[in-house]
Image (tube, rainbow, N blue to C red):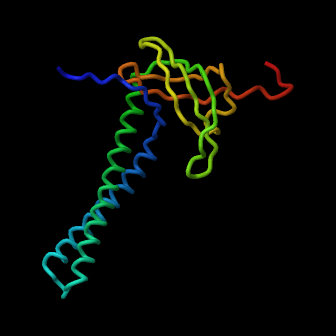
Amino acid sequence: MPAFRTREPVLLDPQGPVITMIACVVGGILMLGAGAAAVFCAVLAATGIGGTRGGWTWAAAGLALFSAFVASVGLSTVVSARAERRATIRLAAHGVEATALVLAVSSAPPTNDHHFQVRLLMRISGPGFASFESSNELPRYRVGSVAQGTVLPARVDPSTLVFTLERPPAPDAAGTGS
């Protein structure tokens, strides 16, 4: 009997074409450069070209393995950048407007570049899909000063449950009144 996987909601950080292109170029450079170095070092280690003997053969083999690892990082960079861009395009084409009700807010560990984060538990609802809950860590600058009960605009792909959150509306400046 086949096991069915339930669709898990995924918060998508939309990727534009320029970011995707940069990621693919960097990944391609890593993949091609390190791949060529891996082949060169493997041939050097296997054949002993250039008088590599003893310890140098092991060094060349180690460099070949390291270069192969770097090439695989480059390949995964290209694959993930293209997948995120595809998901962004699909969300733009097939997504429906939705709302995300913040059920709970708590602090989360900062990002690697020292941005403060918040952990949000949200209930996302809209037309064309059953409401679902999702817990995500987001940089504070992306969601502003959200509190329990805040309603954020969202966009959801009903078939995959990939969603994105829009920035919350800016509060009115004091004294401008609308």
**Which residue is more in the foreground, 150 or 105?**
105
Q: Position of residue 165 (x, y in %)?
A: 54, 28
> What residue is rendered at 37% in x and 55% in y?
25
Q: Residue furthest right?
A: 175
User: Is residue 92 something one can see in this rendering?
Assistant: no
Q: Position of residue 109 (x, y in %)?
A: 59, 44
For the N terminus, the quadrant is top left
User: Is residue 107 something one can see in this rendering?
Assistant: yes
Q: Is residue 11 above or below residue 98?
A: below
**Which residue is more in the foreground, 62 or 51?**
62
> What residue is rendered at 35% in x and 20% in y?
159
> What residue is rendered at 46% in x and 40% in y?
16
Q: Residue furthest bottom?
A: 51
Q: Residue furthest front?
A: 1
Q: Quadrant of residue 56?
A: bottom left
User: Relative to residue 139, is residue 32 drawn left or right?
Assistant: left
User: Relative to residue 145, is residue 13 drawn left or right?
Assistant: left
Q: Is residue 145 above or below residue 178?
A: below
> What residue is rendered at 67% in x and 28% in y?
146
